[in-house]
Structures are given as structure tokens and as C-alpha cells.
Amino acid sequence: MRQAIEAAWDNRSLLSEKTTIAAIEQVIEDLDKGLLRVAEPLDNGTWQVNEWVKKAVVLYFPIRQMETIEVGPFEFHDKMALKRNYKALGVRVVPHAIARYGAYVAPGVIMMPSYTNIGAYVDSGTMIDTWATVGSCAQIGKDVHLSGGVGIGGVLEPLQAAPVIIEDGAFIGSRCIVVEGVRVGKEAVLGANVVLTKSTKIIDVTGPEPIEMNGYVPERSVVIPGSYTKKFAAGEYQVPCALIIGQRKASTDLKTSLNDALREHNVAV
């Protein structure tokens, strides 16, 4: 499959050949079943991006035709089929939750009215709350809570770019936005309205001196929105950032640990 995908990526005329189409469709089917992933965790704690799989997702669009999809009284007009057979998959789906075919949703996931795009991976026990969005190729771990209105960005191109990764046990508060390949570590807590892009300063203010980082929220960090003063030609202005104000205490009872972290740091979620 990989050879066929790479060849078609370099020569789009191959998209008309049956063997190429079959390879692309098999990749999307494997993504849908969780047999393939756009990105996968390695034993050393890093993540590997499978560029050829992302290429297959991009190439899937031009080989699809627009069609009308009727769901009871509702009608859609799109190239992508909707995910089906949720009962057999062990997934709870509340109207009007939608996942596209090609997104993996593991048993035990709860989808409130929300949207999950093609190429995404959502692991078991995760809650996708009301009006939350899981973008294309985003990787969501086990027992994650995406609160109401959360926006998890998608990324298909550039191909080498890592997707947004939310690791196991993380809690993403209401109206948070996480985009541009930012990775949120295990059991981290983002308070309401935290916005994280690749260039957003993430500042640990728990010690005597601030520690700045970008693109990664360390495990078990408790994060709230903040701002810092930046000089421009026209004067000094406040620029958004994210502040690490504490640590989620290690506990075998993650729910209790989360509640303690929220109370201790007075974090709105």
C-alpha cells in the first residue's frame, strides 16, 4: 500500500488506476478500524508521524465523488461517508454527533453532539463533549475529556507536521483551542479558554523563575490562560500565553486527582 501511495503522490495520473484506488481505500479502511494511525507513540515517549498515511488521506478526496447522504429527515452533500455501526463498535453517540468514515473511535467513547474528522484517532473511555471538534488526524488518548466547545485542530499538510496530540487522561476545559501540532501530556489539565498554537508561550510560573516552552504541555500540568507584555513599534501590548500554575497530584484515582487539582488552583473548566 505504501509504495502505491507514494507513487500516486508523485504522479497524480495514477489516481485513475484501480490498484491505486484500492490501496488508498484500504488505508482509509484501516484508519477507520484503528489498524493504522497517522501518528503513533513510541516506547521512548516521543511520537512518530506516518507521512505516507497522511498522503493517503489527502489522496482520498480526489478519488471520491460528491453524493447525497440522507439520515432520516436530514440531508448532507459530501464526498465522505459517515461512520456507522456504533452499537457494534461499543460507542455511545448522542444526536447530533458526527464522525466521518476513516476516523477511529474506540469502544467506550462517548460522543455528545460533536464532530470528528477523517484520520482522527479517539481512544477508549474518552468523552467528546457538546460542540467539541476533533480535527483531521488529531490523536486523542484514553480517558480524555474534551469539554464543551473545545477545538482540536486538524493537520494534513505539511505532511511532516505532527498532528495535535492529547495524551491519556488529559482534561481539556471548555472553549479551549489546541492547534498546529501542539502536544498535551498525560493527565494535564487545561482550564477554560486556554489557546495553544505552536508559537504560544507556555510559561511555568510555579518556581522562583519563569520557564518558557512552546508546543508541549508537560504531564500533569495545570494550565490557565495568561498574558505577557510585548513591545511593538506602536507601543507595548498584552499578548496571550498559557501559564502552568501547578501540578495535578499523582493518584491511582484520576477522577479524585482531577477534582483536587481544580479545587486547589481554582481553575475554571
Image (cartoon, rainbow, N blue to C red):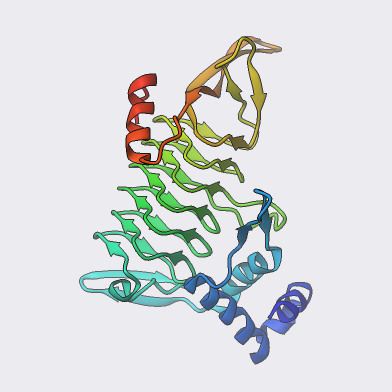
- At x 33%, y 48%, the residue is 131
- Residue farthest to the front, as pictured: 252
The x and y percentages for residue 33 are 48, 73
In the drawing, does residue 9 fall left or right of residue 257?
A: right
In the drawing, does residue 33 fall left or right of residue 234?
A: left
* Viewer-closest of 71 and 191: 191
Quadrant of the rendered structure where residue 74 is?
Answer: bottom left
* Viewer-closest of 159 and 67: 159
In the drawing, does residue 118 fall left or right of residue 114?
A: right
The x and y percentages for residue 34 are 51, 70
**Res 17 seen here:** no
Q: Is residue 106 above or below residue 180?
A: below
Quadrant of the rendered structure where residue 17 is?
Answer: bottom right
From the image, which quarter does the N terminus lie in? bottom right
Q: Is residue 98 above or below residue 245?
A: below
Q: Is residue 68 above or below residue 224?
A: below
**Res 207 seen here:** yes
The x and y percentages for residue 118 are 50, 64
In the drawing, does residue 95 fall left or right of residue 40?
A: left
- At x 57%, y 81%, the residue is 26
From the image, which quarter does the C terminus lie in? top left
Q: Is residue 63 above or below residue 206?
A: below
- At x 50%, y 19%, the residue is 226
The x and y percentages for residue 170 are 45, 42
* Viewer-closest of 63 and 225: 225
